[in-house]
Image (tube, rainbow, N blue to C red):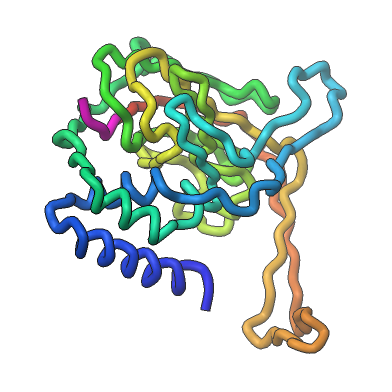
Amino acid sequence: MNGTSSSAPIISGVAALIYQVNPDLTWRDVRHIMATTATKIDVNVPKITLKRNDEVGLDPNSFIAQDTWQTNQAGYAFHPYYGFGMVDATKAVQMAANGYQNLPQLVTTEWIAPKFNDNQQTILENYKGASKNIEVTDNATIESIQIKISITHSRISDLAIVVFSPNGTRSVVMTPRSLLNIDTDINEEFDQTILLSHAFYGEQAKGTWKVQVVDTNQGVFKYYAYDKNDQYDACKKSYKYYNKKSKNIPNNKKLGTFQEVQLKIFGHP
């Protein structure tokens, strides 16, 4: 058993231990304790960088599609695979039991839009992308953020969506090569789609945020589908494919459009 099948009951068990020593905690406090006491794992996992030939003078000619571990301005290490890291039950229980002060009341902003949110931007097929800035005027200590974004593009899996905090922390909230093209219901656009990030945990919200949409692929998109009768050979540690199929999806004939975006902050004073 692995993945969420093992992590969910393990985390639930640690949460129960934390509540046992301090039953006055809220779920936000439990999350805060786990995040604060977690341990980084797989510390050398590399970032994933996409590259292409700079044949038409595009700059830059590479794009970080997925970050490695990064430490934000508040000192929290975060990775898109591992979150804040491996939960440490001993440290978490000790933190909860020894004079822990509950977090202040949760503060949630309204949806905050850019000053000129109606200005639609064309998503050029380069790594500069299209971006919109959002100004947050009231301060708060961030627990999580959401964006609500609208995009039109005929091959959504080409796109990456990146959020930058006022402190310079970067979070890829949608990675490219996502196979979203397979589902025709979401092939053409994001219509006020909501995405979440915890990468900015503990940072201050006030300042200029940037949301960037990048078209990472100018060529043919190819994916493989496998038959339900495919079998895994445990001895050879490989699959035996009975009916392996591939499908090519041509590049979008029309450039995509970054229509609008809004930001919401969840945090405390």
Quadrant of the image occupied by residue 58: top right
Residue at the far front: name it. Answer: 98
Q: Is residue 219 left or right of residue 133?
A: right
As for residue 194 lying within the magenta part, the answer is no
Q: Looking at the image, which residue is at 49% across and 24% down?
A: 164
Q: Is residue 139 left or right of residue 66?
A: left
Q: Is residue 220 left or right of residue 134?
A: right
How many numbered marks are there? 0
The one nearer the camera, 176 or 249, is 176
Magenta segment main secondary structure? strand
- Image coordinates for residue 10, horizontal then vertical, percent: 40, 69
Q: Is residue 151 visible?
A: yes
Q: Is residue 94 left or right of residue 244?
A: left
- Image coordinates for residue 232, horizontal then vertical, percent: 71, 85
Quadrant of the image occupied by residue 264: top left
- Image coordinates for residue 237, horizontal then vertical, percent: 78, 81
Quadrant of the image occupied by residue 155: top right
Q: Looking at the image, which residue is at 50% across and 43% down?
A: 188
Q: Is residue 120 visible?
A: no
Residue 66 position (above or below residue 181) = above
As for residue 268 lying within the magenta part, the answer is yes
Q: Looking at the image, which residue is at 78% across and 84% down?
A: 240
Give the magenta part as a residue range: 265-269
The one nearer the camera, 157 or 90, is 90
Q: Looking at the image, which residue is at 82% across and 84% down?
A: 236
**Position of the C terminus by quadrant:** top left
The one nearer the camera, 103 or 128, is 103
